[in-house]
Image: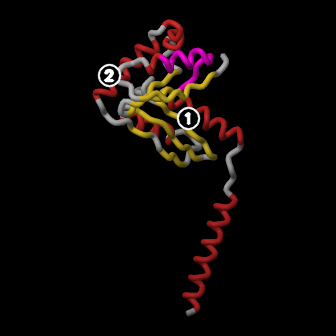
Amino acid sequence: MRTRLLCVASVLTLGILCFAQEAQREQPTAKAEERIIKQVRHEILMLPFYGVFDNLSYKVNGYNVTLLGQVARPVTRSDAESAVKHIEGVEHVDNQIEILPVSPMDDGLRRRLFRAIYRYAPLHKYALGVQKPIHIIVKNGHVTLEGVVDSEADKNFANIRANGVSGVFSVTNNLEVVKP
């Protein structure tokens, strides 16, 4: 009886110590969280198959990272999660990236939308970099434009050009205007 009581007391003490240690666990400093944010951004931009037809974003809450967005290739989703998991300080990755359905019709729309937007003279400046600032997301004929542009006029040009492509059912323009 005495041994059993001693065993129960030991287990309770150990449980209380573990709970206290978890409660005392320090929150990340602002500097540590900022470092994680920069690293996540860097890792996403360095993904080999991340392109103009994908839209990736993320949220950092302490040592936890939530991945959001849409990708045209399943490998991009798994690559993003794998890259972020290996960042120093990241404890948990919640991968909420949606894989867009495989569709030859959507693939053709993506190509036509790319040409309509990036080959249009007033928007040609956005085609110059490796990472394009206007992302074209196509899901079952419905188009979403994500990213950043320099002016309200450029945002409207992209919207008009996307709406003018045959086969597009609707266009949602989520482009943000950011002054350079």
Return the disc, 2 or 1, that comes first in the chain's sequence.
Answer: 1
Quadrant location, the N terminus: bottom right
Residue toward you, 88 or 55: 55
Which residues lie in the magenta part?
Answer: 147-160
- Amino acid type, label 1: Val
Name the spot of residue 62 as percent of width and height, x first.
63, 46
Tell me the quarter of the picture where residue 114 sits: top left
Query: Which label is found at residue 40?
Result: 1
In the image, what residue occupies the spot 60% across and 42% down? 60
Name the spot of residue 22 as percent of width and height, x first.
64, 61
Q: Residue furthest top?
A: 121
Query: Which label is found at residue 108?
Result: 2
Near mark 2 (Cα within 10 A), the count class, few <14, some 14-19 or many ≥20, is few
In the image, what residue occupies the spot 42% across and 37% down? 77
Secondary structure category for the residue under label 2: helix
In this rendering, the label closer to the viewer, 2 or 1: 2
Tell me the quarter of the picture where residue 149 sits: top right
Q: Main secondary structure of the magenta part?
A: helix
Q: Is residue 40 above or below residue 177?
A: below
CA distance separating discs 2 and 1: 31 Å
Drawn side of residue 53 relative to residue 150, left or right? left
In the image, what residue occupies the spot 51% across and 18% down? 158
- Amino acid type, label 2: Gly
Residue toward you, 17 or 95: 95
Check if mark 2's residue and mark 1's residue have beta carbons within 8 Å. no
In the image, what residue occupies the spot 41% across and 19% down? 113
* 25 inside magenta stretch: no
Name the spot of residue 7 as percent of width and height, x first.
56, 82
Residue toward you, 134 or 80: 134
